[in-house]
Amino acid sequence: MYQDKTLVCKECGNEFVFSAGEQEFYAERGFQNEPQRCKSCRDKRKNAAKGGSREFFTAVCAACGGEAKVPFEPKSDRPVYCSECFAKIKASEE
């Protein structure tokens, strides 16, 4: 039903593909407008909206005792995991 479309980014002027799968996703969500920016320009806008770089905090992983860098300030009442241990925990929950 859907076919890939080539669109032009209004930010950088480069062409990008609005794939059939993306069109289907937009339709399922009720989005009526096609994207106006390529992925690269969308990502740049998202990062700029977040205020640029994120602040990271260092904590001790509750599972392995290693260093964990997290984008939130750890609280003493909740465990913090390094990315490897967090991935293992998430995988075991599925």
Image (cartoon, helix red, strand yellow):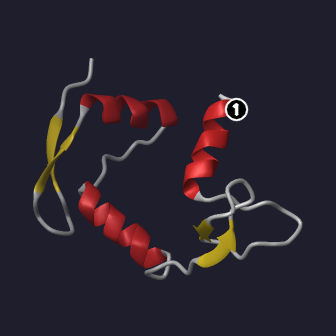
Whether residue 23 is visible to the viewer of this picture, yes or no, is yes
Q: Position of residue 5 (x, y in %)?
A: 16, 37
Q: Residue at x 67, y 41 (%)?
A: 89
Whether residue 37 is visible to the viewer of this picture, yes or no, is no
Three-letter residue code for mark 1: Glu
Q: Position of residue 79 (x, y in %)?
A: 79, 60
Front-most of residues 49 and 23: 49
30 w.r.t. 61: above or below: above
Residue named by callout 1: 93
Q: Residue at x 15, y 68 (%)?
A: 12
Front-most of residues 49 and 13: 49
70 w.r.t. 30: above or below: below
Q: Position of residue 33 (x, y in %)?
A: 36, 47
- Report whether 7 appears left or right of 83: left
Q: Position of residue 59 (x, y in %)?
A: 68, 73
Front-most of residues 24 and 63: 63
- Report whether 20 appears left or right of 77: left
Image quadrant assignment for residue 68: bottom right
Q: Residue at x 46, y 76 (%)?
A: 49
Q: Quadrant of the C terminus?
A: top right
Q: Residue furthest front?
A: 65
Image quadrant assignment for residue 23: top left
